[in-house]
Image: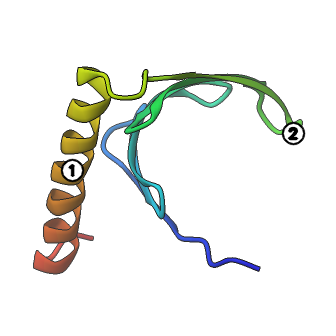
């Protein structure tokens, strides 16, 4: 049995940032259709809201690529901003 952590915050109506044990991710879309980007790659998902039925596909960044390295650096920067926001006085 592992410990899981996930915290998410809506930045606007269709944009959400999520922080989990795997790092931060940014999701754009409505219920039923969403695109998420994290340090590992891009995930698209489509589903029928309220039904529990969905389909998702992950496109991983190539190992050792400049994109993967940049995404890791960006993920670290986002994590610092989120931690500062939480501790300085965000909702």
Helix or strand or loop: what does disc 2 sit on?
loop
Residue 27: % across, % down: 44, 34
Does 1 sit above or below residue 37?
A: below
- Nearest the viewer among 49 and 84 is 84
Residue at the image point whose x is 22% and y is 73% from the top: 86
Mark 2 is surrounded, within 10 Å at the Cα level, by few (under 14), some (14 to 19) or many (20 or more) other residues, namely: few
Q: How is the image coloured?
A: rainbow
Q: Quadrant of residue 8?
A: bottom left
Residue 2: % across, % down: 69, 77
Look at the image and tell me in which quarter the N terminus lies. Answer: bottom right
Helix or strand or loop: what does disc 1 sit on?
helix
Q: Is residue 86 left or right of residue 12?
A: left
Mark 1 is surrounded, within 10 Å at the Cα level, by few (under 14), some (14 to 19) or many (20 or more) other residues, namely: some
Residue at the image point whose x is 21% and y is 50% from the top: 78
Residue under pointer 1: 78
Residue under pointer 2: 52
Does 52 sit above or below residue 5?
A: above
Q: Are marks 2 and 1 in contact (CB under 8 Å)?
A: no
Quote the CA–CA distance across marks 2 and 1. Answer: 30 Å
- Nearest the viewer among 32 and 61 is 61
- N-terminal label among 2 and 1: 2
Does 6 sit above or below residue 44?
A: below
- Nearest the viewer among 66 and 39 is 66
Q: Quadrant of residue 14?
A: top left
Does 56 sit above or below residue 79?
A: above
Residue 26: % across, % down: 38, 38
Residue at the image point whose x is 24% and y is 58% from the top: 79
Residue 85: % across, % down: 16, 66
């Amino acid at each position: 049995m592992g410990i899981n952590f996930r915290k998410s915050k809506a930045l606007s109506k269709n944009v959400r940032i999520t922080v989990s044990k795997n790092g931060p991710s940014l999701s754009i879309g409505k219920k039923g259709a969403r695109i998420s980007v994290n340090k590992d790659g891009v995930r698209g998902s489509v589903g029928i809201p309220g039904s529990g039925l969905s389909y998702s596909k992950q496109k991983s960044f190539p190992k050792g690529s400049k994109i993967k390295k940049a995404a890791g650096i960006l993920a670290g920067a986002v994590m610092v901003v989120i931690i500062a926001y939480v501790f300085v006085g965000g909702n």
